[in-house]
Image (spheres, rainbow, N blue to C red):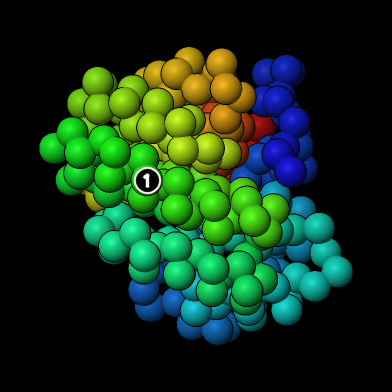
Amino acid sequence: MNPPPAPSRPNPSGAELARWIDHTLLKPDAMRGDIRKLCDEARTHCFFSVCVNPVFVSEARRLLDGHPVRVGSVVGFPLGADSTGIKAAAAREAIEDGAQEIDMVLQIGALRARELTLVREDIRSVVEVCHAERVLLKVILETCLLSTEEKEIACDLCMQAGADFVKTSTGFSCSGATPEDVALMSRRVAARGLGVKASGGIRTRADALTMLAAGATRLGTSQSVQIVTEED
């Protein structure tokens, strides 16, 4: 289900880069026409997936029917402050609508308060819903709000709960992905083989290559077309 390892050569083609990208549109003012454009672009450039808000999952799945581009959606987005039951139900509904990957936001305040059992079980509840349907789960840490120790703890909880990926950011908080955070997360989850998704603030080819070099195995960005068509 995951893209191959990051490019071994220093200057991969746009088509090669596209296989690491979740082509993303999560703006609150997105309309159906925007989703059609997103899916058209995903088909044209063969991005790994599109990532859309839950209300557009069925539309995206219909538009991409018969194409290998996957459909992802979000849960507890962007604050992570929904109850565990709501998150699990939202994941279930998105999957029923056709989502093949889920990106959930963990309970950030609970993590910072060291309510670690609560955070782990919050993640585990969505893991169980996703894995019952062979759907990947990525857990968004919102790294800009966390200390180094909290990022490490969050990675550990994701591994304990059985998540498939750790992800840096929603793109809706104070800042996005940094290569330092990607490298930290990659080192922390390496033993368990989780993926690392960098998202938030990835706007150029140079940004994308920097994140892949730091250890990202997936990139989330709304600037995907620019990244893969940018001249070397």
Query: Within 10 angstroms of label 1, few (less than 14), some, or many (20 or more) residues?
Result: some
Vertical order, 176 against 90 (above or below): above
Q: Is residue 208 visible?
A: no
Q: Position of residue 53 (x, y in %)?
A: 48, 70
Q: Residue at x 61, y 68 (%)?
A: 95
Q: Residue at x 54, y 74 (%)?
A: 93
Judge left or right: residue 7 versus residue 51: right
What kind of residue is marked 1?
Glu
Left or right, 33 with reference to 17: left
What is the x, y in percent for residue 60? Answer: 65, 74
> Picture coordinates of residue 8 (x, y %)?
73, 17
Give the secondary structure at mark 1.
Answer: helix
Identified at 36% across, 50% down, the residue is: 122
Residue 61 percent across, percent down from the top left: 69, 73
Q: Evaluate whether residue 32 shows in this view.
A: yes
Residue 229 to residue 74: above or below: above
Q: Which residue is mark 1?
A: 121
Placement of 114 over or under 74, stated as above or below: above
Depth check, front residue: 133 or 48: 133
Query: 208 or 106, which is in the foreground?
Result: 106
Indicate the quadrant where residue 217 lies: top right
Q: Where the C terminus falls, by quadrant?
A: top right
**Residue drawn at point x = 34 percent, y = 59 percent:** 84
Q: Is residue 21 left or right of residue 19?
A: left
Q: Nearer the viewer, residue 80 or 38?
A: 80
Residue 85 position by quadrant: bottom left
| Res 50 quadrant in image | bottom right
